[in-house]
Amino acid sequence: MINFSNTTFIKSAPSIKEAPQGLFPEVLLVGKSNVGKSSLINALCNKKALAFTSGKPGHTRLLNYYNVDDKLYLVDAPGYGYAKGGFDLDKLFGEMMDDYFSKVTRLKIVLVLLDSRRELNEDDIEIINYLEEKNIRYKLVFTKVDKINQSEKHKLITELKRYDFSENEVIFVSTLKPRTFDALRNVLQN
């Protein structure tokens, strides 16, 4: 059993070469720059300020490693998409992820974070297709589910079916509703 409350920040690494050398499986978090990866880490681990949350999209530009109960690493990747100040997040994300996927041997699962209020865009589909082509295990994690109503959630589920995603490939979470993280914790336990 993993104690998610026993999570500590280890380090930020500009490349996989500087990543922590350990034997723990890795859970990689990817998503748009404003999807709420840091907020998800804080809620998942029951800590308010474990991961830095910023009001400015594109703040994460390194691989941030968190040790979860000496059982696994959470790895927060730079976001893709929009960043203030004209920084090319897509280029950074592409280069860093190519390096990551070609060298990491302990990858357990990739959590693809998506904003439940937004439709999947080309970048989202591209990363999902890449993971499928490489046979990398992943889950779609929709954040901010508290900001949509039941009919919007139903519309989202219908859209996912259009892309051939089943409901068991999807997890809905809200940082305002801690119980929504139980399903995600169960996935990471296995």
Image: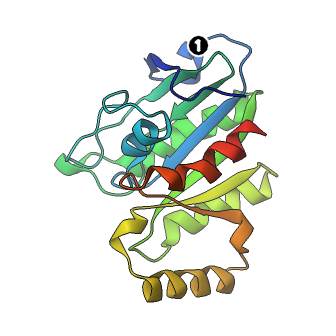
Quadrant of the rendered structure where residue 132 is? bottom right
Q: Could you tell me which secondary element the residue under label 1 belongs to?
A: loop
Residue at the (27%, 45%) spot, across then down: 87
The colour scheme of the drawn protein is rainbow
Q: Residue at x 66, y 56 (%)?
A: 139
State whether residue 101 is above or below residue 15: below
Q: Is residue 78 left or right of residue 179?
A: left
Answer left or right for 29 relative to 136: left
Classify 173 as above or below 72: below
x, y percent for residue 55: 19, 47
Which residue, as the protein is rendered here, is positioned at the far front?
A: 179
For this orientation, the residue located farthest to the top is 21
Q: What residue do we see at 39% from left, 62% from top? A: 144
The one nearer the camera, 83 or 187, is 187
Position in image of residue 125 (x %, y %): 59, 68
Horizontal and vertical percent position of residue 16: 58, 23
Quadrant location of the C terminus in the rendered image: top right
Q: How many marks?
A: 1
Q: Position of residue 13 (x, y in %)?
A: 47, 20
* Vertical comparison of 126 with 184: above or below: below
- Where 154 sits versus 182, above or below? below
Residue marked by disc 1: 20
Residue type highlighted by circle 1: Pro
* In front of the other: 75 or 41: 41
- Which quarter shows the N terminus? top right
Q: Nearer the viewer, residue 188 or 140?
A: 188
Q: Residues within 10 Å of mark 1 (few under 14, many from 20)?
A: some
